[in-house]
Amino acid sequence: MKFFVFIVGLLVPYVLSAQYITGTVTNNNNEPLAGASLHWKNTAIGTTTDINGQFKLTARKIPIKTLIVSYVGYTTQTLDVTDETEINFILEASESLDEVVIESQRDGVIISSLSPIKTELITQTELAKAACCDLAGCFETQTTVQAQTTNVITNSKELRILGLSGVYNQVLINGFPMIQGLTYTYGISSIPGTLVDNIYISKGANSVLQGFESISGQINVETKDPAHTDMLLLNAYINSFSEKHLNANYAFKKGKWSNLTAVSTVQPANAFDKDDDTFLDLPKLTRYTFFNTLKYGNEAHWGWNSELGIRFVNEQRIGGQINFDADTDKGSNEIYGQTVNFNQPEVWSKTGYRMNDQHNFTFYASSFYQNQNSYFGTVKYDAEQTNVFANLQHEFKYGAHSLKSGLSFKHLNIDETVLFTYNDLNRTYDGDYYRNENIVGVFAENTMTLFDDKLTWILGLRVDNHNEFGTKVTPRTLIKYNIAPKTVIRANIGTGWRTVNLFSENVGLLVSSRDIIFKEALEPEQALNTGINITQNFDGENINGFFSADFYHTNFKNQVFPDYDTDPTKAIIENFKGKSISNVFQAEVSLNLYKRYEFKTGYSYLDVYREIDGEKDVLPFNPKHKVVANFGYKPLSNTFRIDVNFHWYGEQRLPDTKSNPVDYRRPDFSEDYAIMNAQFTYNLNRVELYTGCENIFDFRQEQPILSWQDPFGAYFDTSSVWGPTRGREFYLGVRYKIPSK
C-alpha cells in the first residue's frame, strides 16, 4: 500500500499544472546577482533572487506575460514569455554610469524561504568568525552541528546532528560521499578550512538523490568555486601548542575554463601535558594535502558543463605518553603510544548536458583509496579501502513540477587486520575483517508547487539492492507551506539505513583495554525520522534575521551501539532491535542590527535513550540541555571585527564503571560546563590579521583517561571523555588575498 501511494504521488505532477517560471540572474562574469527584482509588467506580482541568483515566480493568471528584470547598476531587461519554464538572465552593466561599485556582506547563516528542505547555509562570513583550521572546526558558532572527539589521544572527531553519532548523518564533499569507512575517522579533519566555500546543513530525512544513508541529517561541503574565488589566498596559523598550518590557493579563469589549485600542510605541536597524567594534551600531527579542480562551462546554461577534481592526503598522527618515540616504541608494552599513518588519493567528476529548459542530464562519478597503518598501544591495526560511486540523473521540468530520476552504483571494499603485539589481557578480537559491498539503486523524486506557490511537496522513492542484505526500499516526503511571505513551516518523514564499519566508526574500541565481543553478525541499521520546523524571517531598515524552531523524532528499527555498561572490561557488539529513540528540540534566533552588531543564540534539548527490560536507558555522552550564543561587532568601515561565542553543556551520562576497583571508577554523570571563545580580526585591504583564544576560562576535564597510571592494565579506557582536555588555547593567523579579475 505504501509503495502504491508513493507511485501515485510521483504521477500526480503529470495531472496538476500550477505554472511558474524559474531561473537565474547573473552578470557577464557568471556571478549571481542576489536581490535582483523581477515582476510581471502592469502587475504587482514579482519576486527577488536569492543568494545564488535564483528565483521562482508564479505565471498563473498573468494575461500578458512580459517579465521585467532589474538590478542597481545594470541595464533593465524585458522579455515576452511564451512557453518557457526556465529563464537565465545575463544583465549588462549600465553604460550610463562610469563605474558601479556594489559592496555587500552576506549573512553568516542563511535559511532560504525558497528551498522546500530547511537548509542552513554557512557562508564565508560565518567561517571567518573562528580559526576554522579544518572542517571539524567550522562549527564553533553553530547550534545544529556539534564536533565530538572520538579518540582523545589522536584527536579524531565526528560531526553530530540531532544528538546522534556522526555515523547517522551523511557528509558530502561537493555532493560526493567521500567521508565513509576508513575516511570517517579522520576525514573531516583533513579538509582545510581555507578550501571550504559554503556548508549546507539539513536535518532529518532529506532528498533520496544522494542515497539512503542520511538518518539524522546531511552536511554538504562546497569547496571554493574556481570561477568565483580569489585569484590567490595565502594563510598562516600557529597556536599556543606550536601547531602550524600553512595554506595556499591559486585560481585562474580563461573563457569557459577555470581552475583552482590548493596545497596545505600541518606541522606538529610541541609536547604539552598540563594535567600531569603523562599523556600528550595534543597529538603531534603532520599532514600534506594537494587539491585541484578544473571546471568547464556553467550548469545553468544550455550545452555541456564539466568539473574534474583530484585530491591527495598524506597524514601522520602520534599520541600517547609524553616520552613515547614512534620510531622505537610503537607496539611496545612499556611506553604507551598511538601512531596513525595513511595515504589517500581521491578523484571525482561531474559532467552535465542541459538540452533545454526542460531536460538536463548529469553524471557523477568518484573514487578514493586509503592505506592505513596504525598502532594503538599493543593493538596493530592495518587497513585498506577502495570506494567507487556513480550516479546518472535526469531532470525533467514541466509546468510547476520537477522530476529527477536515475540510477546509482556504490562499491566498497575494506580489508582490516587486527594483531596484538602483546596480549597480556587475553583479548580475543584479533584477526582479519573483510567486507565487499556492491549496491545498485534506482530513484525518482518529484517536486511540485501548488496553491499559487504557497505549497511545495517533494515525494521521493529509491530502491537499492545490496549484494549481501538484499533489496531495501527508502521512501521520503517533504512539505513546505508559506503561511505568510516570510513565515514558512516545513515537515518531513522518511526512512534511512546504513551498513556498519565498526572499527573506523568506533576507533575508541581499539584504544582501550576492553575485549570486543561480537555476539552475532551485524545487520544494517535502520530508522524512521520525522521532523517539523517553522522559520520566521524578518527584514527591516535597521534589523534583519530569523527565528527557527525544530522538533525531530528518530525511531530505530535496528541499531548497533557498543555496550560499555554490562562489563567494564568488555565492549559487547550486537544488533539492538528494541525501542531506541531520539527526541530533539532546537530553537535559534539570529539578529543583525544597524549593519554593525550580530547576535545569535540557540537552545537544544536532547532525549536519546533505549528501553531495556521496560526501563529507560539514557545513552551516554549526550547533554540533555545545550546553549550556544554568539556576539559580533563590525564598524561600517569594516576595518576590524570582534566575535565572541559561548557554549554551555548540561550534564551527560557516562559509561557504568561501578564494578571497577575504587581507583578506576567514574561518576555516573559528568558535570555541566561552559566554554567561551573570542577572536579579533583586523582588515588591511588584502591582508587580514586574526588572533583569538579558545576556552578563555581554561576549563578542563582533569585526567580524562581512566587508569592512565597503568595504560597496559585491564582498566585503561578513554571512553569517559566528556569535555575539553587541552584547556586554554591562543592562536594567531594572517590571510593574504588577491581578488580575481
Image (spheres, grey):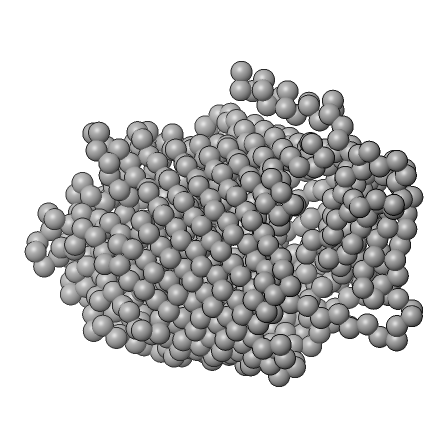
Q: Position of residue 116 (x, y in %)?
A: 61, 41
Q: Residue at x 50, y 27 (%)?
A: 472
| Image location (x, y in percent) of residue 634 | 56, 75
- Horizontally, residue 280 falls left or right of residue 94, namely left
Would residue 248 appear left or right of 657 to someone viewing this image?
Answer: right
The answer to whether one can see residue 688 in this image is: no
- 471 or 47: which is nearer to us? 47
Which residue is depicted at the point 81% across and 48% down?
39
Please say if 485 is above or below 277: above
Location of residue 484 with respect to 283 vertically, above or below: above
Q: Is residue 149 left or right of residue 252?
A: left
Could you say where residue 512 lies in the image, as x and y percent from the top left? 24, 54
Which image quadrant for residue 700?
bottom left
Number of marks in the image? 0
The correct choice, above or below, for 601 with respect to 738 in the image is: above
Q: x and y percent of residue 372 in the render?
A: 43, 56
Identify the residue at the far top of this view: 1
| Quadrant housing the C terminus | bottom right
Residue 37 in view (yes/no)? yes
Q: Residue at x 77, y 39 (%)?
A: 58
Between 231 and 263, the one nearer to me in the picture: 231
- Check the image and name the residue furthest to the bottom: 684
Indicate whether 674 appears above or below 604.
below
587 or 498, which lies in front? 587
Residue located 68% across and 56% down the image: 51
